[in-house]
Image (cartoon, grey):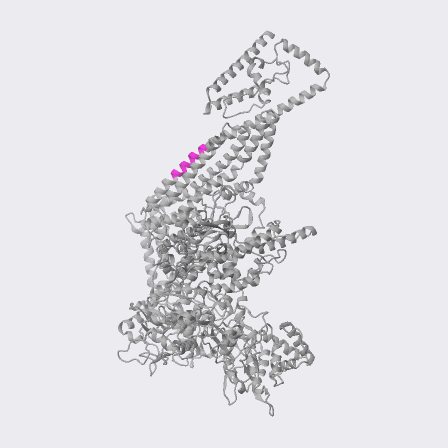
Amino acid sequence: MQAKQIFRYVAMLIAVMILITSTPINSASAVGSPSTDSPNAMARSMIDFFRKDRTELAVDRVSRDELMVYGVFLSNFFIPGKTKLSDMVDASTDKQDTIPRIVSNKFFGSPDNYKQIVDVNTKLYNAIMEVFQSSKSSFGLFKSVPQDGSLPMSGEDFYNKLAGVDTNRKIYAKNGSGDNVVMDLNDKATRAAIQVLFSYSPELILDKEKGLRALTAMYIDGLGNIWGAYDNVAIEEYVLVLPAALNPVVFSKTANGGKFPVANVFVMGGIVKITENFLDGKPFMTPYYNIKDYFTNGSSAGSTMNRSNMLSIFGIQSHSSMTKLSGGSAFRSLGDSDTLIMNSDKVTSNPYQDVQKYINETVSNTFSSNNSFIFLTIDASKFTNGQKYFVDEEALNSDQKDTLSKYLFGGSVFSLDELADDMYYFNVPTGASGGEGDWKTDDDALMMRQKMFAKEVSGQYQFYQGSYFSSPFNGFLHYYYDSKSSGNEQDQVDFLVKWLQDNTTNKTINSTSAEFKALKSFLDSGNFGTDDPDTINAALKLLKFDSNNFVYNLLPSSTLVEDNLIRSNWYQPKLISPTSFGLTEYDSFLGYISIAIRKSAFFKQYNGFDDYSYFEFNGAGLFQSGNGGKIVGHDTVKGSSKKVVGTNGQNAISTLFYNSMVYRVFGMNSTFTRQLTSNMYAGTEVDGVLGKYTTRTAIMNDVNNYPGIYWGYMVQLLGIEKSKDSKTGEEKWDSKRFENDLLPTIILNTMGGGLDLVTIIGGSGVVASEEKTMQEMQTDIVKKIYGLLYDGPNQYRDKLIKSAQDSWIISTHRSITGSWIGNILSVSAGGNQSYASIVGYINTPSLTELPITSWLLDDYMSIYLLLILFVAMIVIIMVITHVRSIREGVLIFIVMAFVLIIPQFFISSVVNLSNTAGDKLYSGRFNYWAITQHQQALSSMRYVKLMDDEKNYIIAQNMEFAREAYSSDVGVRVKWMSPKKDDVFDDMFNKGKITQTLNENLNIFRWLFSSFINQEEYVFNDPLVTYLYRPYNAIATAAKNSYSKLTEKAVSRNESANKLLNAKESSFVFPEYRFKSLLDDNKKVQYSDQQNQLIKSSATLSVTDNSEMEESYRYWALNSSNVSKAIFRNDINSNAGLRAATDEHSEAFLLSTESPFYYFYNALKSRYSRVDGEFKSALLSKEVFRASSDDDLKVNNSMRDFLDLEGLFTYVIPYLYQGNDYVYRWTATNGKSVDTFNFKNAIEPSDPAMKAKFNEEAKRKEDLKAVWKLYSPWVDQIYSLDVMGKQVPIANKKVYVADTANPGAYDDAGRPMIFSEADMYAKGYNYSQLTDVERRIQSTLKSTYKDLMYLTNYYDFDNEVLITAAAMMATFNFNREFSENRLLGESSTLYPQNFELKNFNYDAFMRLILMNSTGEALMDDQDLYARVLEKTSIFSGLLLILCDLMAVIVVPVAKLFVLLLLLFLTIAICLSSVLVPPERLTRTISKNLFIPSLIFLAASIGFAFVISLFMGEGLTGYVGGRTPSLGVSDPSIVMLLMVAVDVLYVFILWKIAKLLIASLKSHVISTVFATVGLAVGAMTAFKQYMHSSMSRTFDGALSHALDTKGENAVNGGPTGGNKPSGLRSRFGKGIMYNHDQLNLSHSDGNEKSNPSMNGRDGQSNNAVLPNEKDRKFENYIDDLSSRRAGSTDRKDDGMRKQTKKSDSVGKDIKSDQSQQKKSEK
């Protein structure tokens, strides 16, 4: 086709495209205006922008009212104490957690629209900044009415108002009401908002350095956010104090009597998550304030959150709303039990009638708000800093501390109309759906009037489905009332008797007793039918369901009310707060009495606890043994001094009883609640602006229903409602302006007027100016096509070609390496879905990991036995055929018994040595991947859960599902010891069939180009010591979760000791020294006070004065009663092991059995998180690592025990060893093996015998699993280091120490155990006097100290990440130091010892190499490879592909080829040495096997070292790196050098392969021919034997033989003693082919001395003479022998002579035969 024709076709194509793009399309909308449903349409309202997924927003055309509402909503994404004013407009591209990106993610499912969010936020930000810059005092908050020149109040002023130092709790501003009041801290809603803030982080309110008091000034902006200034920072650096979404002023527009805003992420965090009926099956006597006891029984994440939160908000629907008193007064029925108790003689109302009606109602009915209450209560037991913030607080006196405590801890009760709770549970595409209308398409759903806790239906309320549960007592009453329906009195009695017998501690009930009748009367009418207090007390005791009496014989005490007791000395106890879940400030009696029941000693010292009317609280045995006081009479019987319980008293008892027992708990929409997640659960550490905060209540700022929150604000703040036009009757949307006199004015640069919902919801909320955009698109298309066809230089065409090249290169790279662009942390071998993820580049894959060879090496013992049998058979044949003597045969057999072991361990040793060297070279570098992955996971899981965000979702997904995974994932993995998971144990006894392995071997491509990571290994074939590869992040998550549970309550040494003693059976015996340090404070080794002080100052750094709290982690693993009972059990035949871990301390024990990592994590986090600045500051503190002493120069600056190894060896290891001791005893009796039924998928056999066997083995398996949970392999390995029974030096003598790993054994010997260099010098010892264990401890500390110094390079990462990394580094060093390799016997090996190369793919190497070369960051919007290619040429891309091919295919295949050759050569040499033993076996093996292996080993290590020079260590900005690096800055040069190194390495491997092939060929040939020769010789011998037997059978054979003999003698033939000649003579006498000899030699001396006798008359004995075929074969062997001999290097002159002599003999034989033939002719 000609060029003109091509041009013509292209021109036609362009014309058609222009015609198509310029032709208007028929549409119902205005001409030139896009459809409102088009995602390309530009929205002019926030609602339309969010609902219609607009890609553009006309920010200037959004109404002021909507922007103001959006500004309030935006504060849901703020974090108090952390968010700065400038964060609103953070447009950073290198961070994923900016506010604009988060908002975009929550509404659109990706951060792509973040620029639009930045534009909107900028409107608000500029308006706020304009006021700040022009008139800062306009935003100021003042402690008194502001005057000219008044300065804004400081955080100290705010704190003083809370504590009552300033009794005026009003806060003022220059705007506001007539008296300038903008907030009143006494307002109920305002106080609740402050309590939410306090519960989120108490430090934020109370801490002097990083809390309120650190703020120099406080301001409120026009949206309602309160900001704080500090340290003279710029305005944009002001930090958030109170978000607008939590500020009641914003929603109520009043400083008093406002509504408490609950529809925000801060309050949602504390709302009880009702995802199931937590009281199902629980005791029927459970008051509403005790339900938190059962949250841990829930299976959902919400139940755990409910348990952990300091703040609890929940709804209670009661039977009654008010309780009436004489005189006409009344008070709220719930949340005010103090008033009821103090006025019990004045109660005139009895709730019984309300209870009956309430029980008979169904929950589907609507209800009014009168008897429904929202509780806000604070669990003071979660507050752990009472000593610091109250007792030691010098700024407040005792009254002010009490005032502050009551303000912060006192709970409140709200009615539903006291809440700002508009919350819409839309179905949303991203987030938590609620099933109440579609957010994007259902306009009617906008007007459903949904509330947070209930639907609003015609002024009434209705529960959300499944969002409530009822008191168990409700069910009891329901059944009891049903029993009354029959009208038979006896039915009621029978039911009540049976119920009490089944559900209380009373097993014998007398239905005729006075107390039973009183109880029945109480249940029938609300009064007891008697005024006798003793009878009433006895009646109530019939309802007991546990060992404790009721609180004043009415209600069970709350087990969660903790005393939170702080004592400065024994006689001045101080109670911070008695509050707990469900108890308000007006329920203090319930709190105090609940404490007293369990802490009676405290209340013996407590004064001021008075009696009130009918309730007696004092007495000689106050609250002891669970006695909760009693009911006493108040009214006096006329004519008697006896006191009785009158009508008012009985009303009070009935009210208190039914109010607490009859209820329904309700909460948010359960469909929505089940999906909620947070980035800040209780216990999360937050990097605040002024310091670190620890959250005590979750914030629901991750998965939530943000559209529902936003629309709820629109409805509340703008008064949106639907109405009908009075004239036309059409429906319309009404709304009000956003106006609030209490908020300062800000001017938004946008369109004026209010919000016009009709135009927005009606579908026309788009800018009608998109036509221009379409025209620009058409023009752009024409320009681009023209640019493609233009024959001159063109930038667009060049860019397009470059982009296409880069795209192809990256796509090819991904296909080769098996990675994908977005998954930057996909570094784990085998983690990607590609065949090309082989890990043989630096790491050398073991042949045990390849299915084609694993079957051989895994079952080598079976093969070894077969080979030994083969050797024995060969030796026997050789002896029979006289090739070898019996002595030689026995010697060959013994030698080969050892030689045949070589194939199993030799190649594995070579691979292991190579990989060990590689691990040491690269482990420090690959710390980067683990630390970075963990940091990225923490960030990504907070914000990204969506499939379309490839870059972060895969990380988030893997971290979510791999949290407890123990197999492959794309992240970093480490080798882990015996993880105590049921599925891990079960897999040990569900092995696959052999056919599975055979099927894998059939596909060569599968094993050649795929990675096969051995996921489990056993130590010396011990099934209890299993190693698995676990994800690093899963380990980190397990540690974090365990720590957060364990820190809820401190554990003391005495508490753990008591549990141990209580669990130990009386007859159980163990060495006294084992738990001496735990059980006994008395030590033999005593020091002076001065030296004691020196030793204490040299020990692990103590950060706080509360040693019990600080050292609590030492005893966590010891504090489980269930575990202690198991390990101290004498009987090993029943109730084996530990069946289940039912509490956090049992879980802590199980984790401790896996590795010391969890101890190190707990120690580092518990101790150094308390350092000012937390752990990252501790890394920079010399005091943490080194002791300081002016009195002892040796101690000064020496290493201290910063890992608290003293606690590990003193408490944890002895306890774990005791568990091992039980395992030893159990397995010694019952064994460790189980018949390998496939228990997981098996069907119970039908055969009775097999069925019994199956059930027996299944039970054995379950028993073994329970025992396995108690086993600590790492402790077992430590005790295999020969630590028992050693002589230890003390001064100039040695003493016997029974256990050098136990400090108690040292103390028994009169010597302390040394735990650090500083400890050694402080106790007066030197290094030469230390035991092996003590030296290993010091080595561990030194290695870890060095690692932690380099960890400072990651200072900017989260503390959680740094603590995890530090604990893992400590674990690596501990395991290395306490491992020992032995040539003979079993080695002691603890894992993990480093990040193993086998768990990293080639992509992990390449990314670090390119990062080191280019300086590019790993984390970025654009992939690293794309950035490198964009800045380089196609040459770099081709080099990248070449590097990929070399690293992924060529190098691994070459390695595998050499390894397979080594394997086959090893076997060939073994077999060859049996058949043809070489003169020097050692030399043969060395030359053919050892030398090539050493060359391979040296080349592999050298190759790994050179490649490591190209790599960096990731982050080295603070303290530099510790490994060398070439530092070549051009990626093209780096990749070119890599290719050169790869080629050189492959060339060396090829040379090694050639040597191996030549040697293999030689030994295979010699083996084959030797085997053939031996077989022929054996057959000939057998033939001769048979011939002789047949000859003796015939009588004439003897005479014929004599005649023949005489004839032969005459003719000069051989005598009977001569050996036959020919083929038989060569093979019959065992002539063997030897590739080390020149010829075939005979062992018969007669043949050598009488060569002429080798001639033979062919006709005289045909059975002996060789035929022509035999001669040809013989000549072939001779010829082959000669040629082989000529190619060997072991010939000598004697051999040459022998060869010549043999040739001459052959010639003589031939000449004799020819002469004989001639004479015959």
Q: Is residue 1284 above or below residue 742?
A: above
Q: Nearer the viewer, residue 601 or 317?
A: 601
x and y percentages locating residue 1473 in the rendered image: 53, 30
The furthest residue to the front = 1292
Q: Is residue 396 visible?
A: yes
Q: Is residue 904 above or below residue 1578?
A: below
> Quick check: 507 left or right of 603?
right
x and y percentages locating residue 1261 in the rendered image: 60, 53
| Screen quadrant of the C terminus | top right
Q: Nearer the viewer, residue 1170 or 1068?
A: 1068
Q: Nearer the viewer, residue 509 or 1207?
A: 1207
> Quick check: 1609 left or right of 969?
right
Q: Is residue 958 visible?
A: no
Q: Nearer the viewer, residue 1344 or 1269?
A: 1344
Principal secondary structure, stretch drawn in magenta: helix
Q: Is residue 532 above or below residue 1188?
A: below
x and y percentages locating residue 687 in the rendered image: 38, 64
Q: Is residue 248 above or below residue 1070?
A: below
Q: Within the image, what quadrant is residue 192 found in?
A: bottom left
- Is residue 1554 one of those drawn in magenta? yes
| Screen quadrant of the N terminus | top left
x and y percentages locating residue 554 in the rendered image: 57, 78
Span shown in magenta? 1543-1555
- Is residue 636 one of those drawn in magenta? no
Give the total number of marks visible in the rendering: 0
The furthest residue to the bottom = 639
**For the point 52% across and 25% down, which residue is it?**
1634
